[in-house]
Image (cartoon, grey):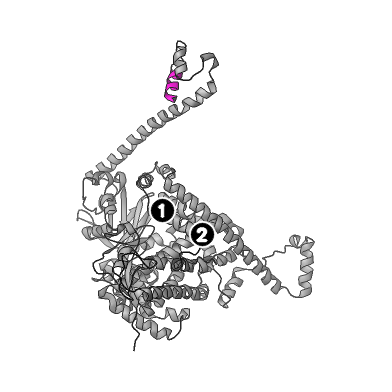
Amino acid sequence: MFFALSSVLDDDLNLNLNLNHLNHLNLKPIDRIDWTRLVFVSLPYHAIRTFCVANAFFLVFLLLRWFSRWLAFHLGIDRYHYLHTPAPSSWSFHFIGHLKAILASNPAEAHLAYLRQVQCPIYSYRTILFANRLFISDPKAVAYILASQNSYDFEKPKFVRDFLTNILGEGILVSEGETHRRARRVLQPAFTPGTIRALTPVFFKYALQLRKNLLDCVDRTEGPAGRAFLPGQSDISASISSKASPVLNVAIWLSLCTMDIIGEAGFGHEFRSIEGMANPDAAEDVLRRAFVSATASAEHPGAIDIILMTLARITGLRFWQKLPTKRSRRIARQYELLREISQRIIDRKKEEVLEEMETLRMQQLPSASSASALATSERNGAGASAGVDLRATTTKQMFDELNEAGERPKDIIYQMLRANLSNDLPAALKLRDDEMLPQITTLLLAGQETTSTQLTWCLWLLAKPENKHFQTALRREVRDVFGGRDEIRHDELQSLKLLNNVMLETMRLQSAIPSSLRVPKRDHVLPLSQPYTTRDGKSTFDRLPIYKGQDLFVFIQALNRAPHLWGDDADAFNPGRWDALPESTTGLANGNGSGSGSGSGEWSTGTPAQNLWTFLAGPRGCIGKSFAIAEFKAILATLVRELEFDVIPGWEVEPKQDVVLSPRVKGQEGLKKQMPLRISRAVPEV
């Protein structure tokens, strides 16, 4: 209809147009036309025409950009012509580079194959529109990127931050620069050694609840069945179960356990996830449902969503990521619900903190008469003019002393609000409520999904036939220390040597987050741990110029599994390696990345603790590392003590990239994330 009207307008409303034609178009006679309506009806046509012309020019621009990159590469005149580049695998290489092979393979598999092909931890590969991306797995270069003095110069790409913000809000995982500094400063007191010690009983509480439910599943299993008969079980798993030895998806059970832990330890909220799994009639927690729905939507995008996310990676086309789709609208609805519930949690916790601060203030007053006088002064309004502050005597140091004194455990959000409201924190560094809210959703993802995924891979590694002797030895160690107790102190948990080795080896081999994308805000020169041969083999380079806006792919998995660092058995599960690490890995902690000696090292603040890159390092390293380690150990020790785990012969488990590196079973992709293991009661030692 509006095309007909537009043609009339374009002809200046030809006065010879007969009235019959006007009537056919449902128009009024010329002298009675609503001109305002006609103008606005014609606007869509002109807007579409302008949009099409603009996009045609933009398409030409993109084609020229692609061609210039392609030509520079083939002429050997681009910035990084001297770096190794993996060989193209198909004709699509000329348009989307190596992306087809990377997306078609399991996560990290293609990059590891390229690494073996080029035999150099620094190489260049191509992405959409033949854009150049640098693969970085030299330890000294990565240490430089993560170091305190440089880390805020290397940001997450905009499209990654937008994606995470849609799910989590702008919490500490997403924020950059000064916003991240302020958030980290407020979060830090929530992860002190005293706090982790106080929260350890919470870890054991839900680990024991998980073990009880799994043992119930074992005892209820009479044999194979045609349909699933246990929580967290598929029909095919039920069909191969045997008496007192069911096949269960341990991934879902572990995620429920870590969800309950982060609920209570994170913000004093009871999700009752394990209880709900065992009792389907129980009411589901609204916050948990909203979070699970949002992350599930993010993990399984449709074809349109994938196309829009791909286009959003191109400078100038990032607005595509903001176009509404069914998935994005669903995520937005769930995130809004998360915000509402999180705000209620923040308000409740803030009231508790303020009450505690008032109690502390009153305890520090010199006498009851002074307190009475001060109260009277405040009622009369003199307190404010005299500079009296409700929180004048409540400082961060006082709260830290309360933590170290062994007061009842306070959850992470409570600790954050304490730090944020303390009088010795300058107003400019305090977080607003809208900046506190995303920290809850970030805690849910970082404190639940990553730890449960690491534990899932750990049980799988221990359940493999070639590794069962490690499972047996770990069970013996745990039983010796626990004795007849259900839980142990934090220091006892940390003293379990094999438990620590198994955890570190799992995180080395199967990092839940195997890589990190970074983009520099300004030019840098990365130092390298040794000289590397150029692409033509005629010279070497021992440093790498990095230009503003250059995509960097920091590959954690390669650093954790590099043969030149970890030895010829780098791909093998060997917890014993942590008893005597090779010098090539201990050198990482010295900042030189080559194991060539001792000393503080120029980039020591960017090197990983315990020679493991899984948690990254520096200011952008995982702030909740100690929390995750204690939680991991408490759950693993509790389960292995009484349960035995075995893999299913013939079922091939492979990693798939969701928000984290999740397991799938080949041939059972329709079941999505799962780790089916055979579970039975561990034989008591005589």
Residue at 43% over, 79% down? 493
Q: Is residue 526 left or right of residue 485?
A: left
Q: Is residue 380 magenta?
A: no
Q: Residues within 10 Å of mark 1 (few under 14, many from 20)?
A: many
Quadrant of the image for the N terminus?
top left
Which numbered disc flags the more N-terminal residue, 1 or 2? 2
The single residue placed furthest to the top in the displayed view is: 16
From the top left corner, tell me how far across and down residue 438 is, in percent.
51, 57
State the mark number for residue 399: none
- Span highlighted in magenta in the image: 2-10
Callout 2: SS: helix
Quadrant of the image for the C terminus?
bottom left
Give, as a three-letter code, the residue at label 1.
Ala
From the top left corner, tell me how far across and down residue 40 is, in percent.
50, 26
In the depicted structure, whether residue 215 falls above or below residue 96: below
Callout 1: SS: helix
Q: CA distance from mark 1 to mark 2?
A: 17 Å
Magenta-drawn stretch, dominant element (helix, strand or loop): helix
In the depicted structure, whether residue 9 falls above or below residue 60: above
| Nearest to the observer: residue 665 or residue 99 | 665
Q: Which residue is mark 2?
A: 287
| Nearest to the observer: residue 116 or residue 161 | 161
| Nearest to the observer: residue 297 or residue 561 | 297
Give, as a three-letter code, the residue at label 2.
Leu
Q: Is residue 261 left or right of residue 392?
A: left
Question: Quadrant of the rendered structure where residue 673 is?
Answer: bottom left
Q: Which residue is mark 1?
A: 298
Please say whether residue 139 is visible from this viewpoint.
yes
